Amino acid sequence: MPIERLSTASLEKIFKNRIKDPATCVVKFYSNGCHFCEALKEEYESIAQEFDDILFFVYNIDDEPSIDHIARINGVPTISVVKTGPRSKVSFLDDPKTPHEEMWYHPDDITKFIKKEK
């Protein structure tokens, strides 16, 4: 499934439960100047191909550096799973205990997180 870049308005719709249809969305928060984010790009695209029933998105925090009113993130990259619909839920992947030296997150940890939260 292709990965779609979110606008700030679309991110707000997803995170503020303004989408009534049930869906599972994965959002990777990134920044243009983040070397971890750039290194994680291909792995994230590969992970997205593993799931037919999940929507994958990316959001560039450079578009809205003060996104605390939408999502409270500690830095980038950050991975979240959002379930929309009547029983909405937002989850964030914890920072790794031992970060991957190039990508911050280990790809297997991302996949396990998505499977657990979907």
Image: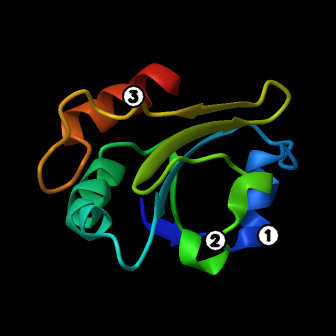
Answer above or below: position of 76 versus 31.
above
Give x and y (percent) for residue 93. 44, 33
Q: Earlier in the sequence, mark 2 or mark 3?
A: 2
Counting from the top left corner in percent of width and height, residue 98 is at: 18, 31
Tell me the amino acid under the disc marked 2.
Pro
| Badge 2 density bin: few <14, some 14–19, many ≥20, Cα 10 Å | few
Q: Disc 3 residue type?
A: Phe
Give amino acid for label 1.
Answer: Ala
Q: Is residue 108 left or right of residue 18?
A: left
Give the mark, 3 or 1, whose residue is nearer the N terminus. Answer: 1
Mark 2 residue element: loop
Question: Can you tell which of label 2 and label 1 is closer to the viewer?
Answer: 2
Q: Alpha carbon of mark 3 to alpha carbon of mark 1: how far?
A: 26 Å
Ranked by sequence position, the earlier of labels 2 and 1 is 1
Pointer 3 residue: 113
Task: Count numbered badges in the picture.
Answer: 3
Query: Residue 89: x, y in percent?
Result: 70, 29
Q: Residues within 10 Å of mark 3 (few under 14, many from 20)?
A: some
Q: Which residue is mark 1?
A: 9
The residue to which callout 2 is attached is: 65
Using the image, tell me which numbered label, if any, was put on residue 37: none
Helix, strand or loop status at disc 1: helix
Q: Quadrant of residue 35?
A: bottom left
